[in-house]
Image: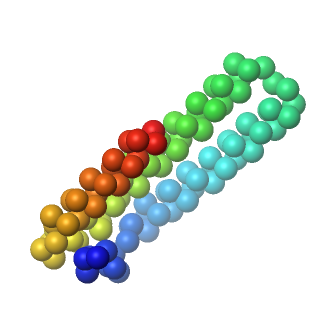
């Protein structure tokens, strides 16, 4: 494993807070969706809410990938380990896209 994989650089504090806030909202959306299901709300409303949760998760994934490239990958590039960082990023992107 390359040295840059054990870097002290992580996501920026602002991005970390943004992601934490987004995940908290998603938790609330999922709880609301579950409550709607238990209350036997109509299927269309459930589907709309499920799509909203999926879209919110997609946004978290995008922000996380952007932050990863701006911090972790950038540090690897500047430390001369850019090729390895790009290979790892390629693998991560492949995993994300397969599960989308």
Q: Which quadrant holds residue 43?
A: top right
> Does any portion of residue 70 appear in the rendered image?
no
| Residue 69 image offset from top left, x and y in percent | 28, 59
Task: Give the left or right position of residue 94, taking residue 49 as reference.
Answer: left
Which residue corresponds to the image point at 22% horizontal and 59% vertical from the top-left?
87
- The answer to which quarter of the image holds residue 44 is top right
Residue 29 locus on image (x, y percent): 68, 42
Residue 83 lies in what quarter of the image? bottom left
Q: Is residue 12 above or below residue 30?
A: below
**In the picture shown, does residue 42 fall above or below 9?**
above
Residue beneath the point at 81% across and 38% down: 35
Direction right: furthest residue:
39
Along the viewing direction, whichever of 86 and 72 lies nearer the viewer:
86
Which residue in the rendered view is the most extreme toward the left? 80
Looking at the rendered image, the quarter that the C terminus falls into is top left
- Residue 46 in the image: x percent, y percent? 71, 27
Residue 48 appears in the figure: yes
Quick check: 39 left or right of 26? right
Measured along the vertical axis of the image, is residue 88 above or below residue 27? below
66 versus 59 height, above or below: below
The residue closer to the viewer here, 73 or 67, is 73
Counting every numbered tag in the picture gives 0
Instruction: Answer left or right for 59 relative to 88.
Output: right
Colouring mode (rainbow / by chain / secondary structure / one colour): rainbow
- Residue 55, percent across and down? 52, 36
Q: Residue at x 67, y 50 (%)?
A: 27
Q: Is residue 6 left or right of residue 43?
A: left
Q: Quadrant of the N terminus?
A: bottom left
Q: Which residue: 66% across, 25% down?
A: 47
């Amino acid at each position: 494993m390359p040295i840059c994989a054990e870097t002290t650089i992580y996501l920026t504090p602002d991005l970390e807070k943004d992601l934490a806030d987004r995940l908290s909202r998603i938790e609330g959306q999922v709880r609301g969706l579950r409550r709607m299901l238990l209350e036997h709300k109509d299927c269309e409303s459930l589907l709309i809410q499920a799509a909203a949760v999926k879209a919110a998760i997609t946004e978290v994934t995008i922000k996380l990938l952007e932050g990863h490239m701006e911090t972790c990958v950038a540090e690897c590039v500047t430390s001369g380990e850019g090729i390895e960082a790009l290979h790892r990023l390629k693998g991560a992107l492949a995993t994300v896209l397969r599960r989308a």
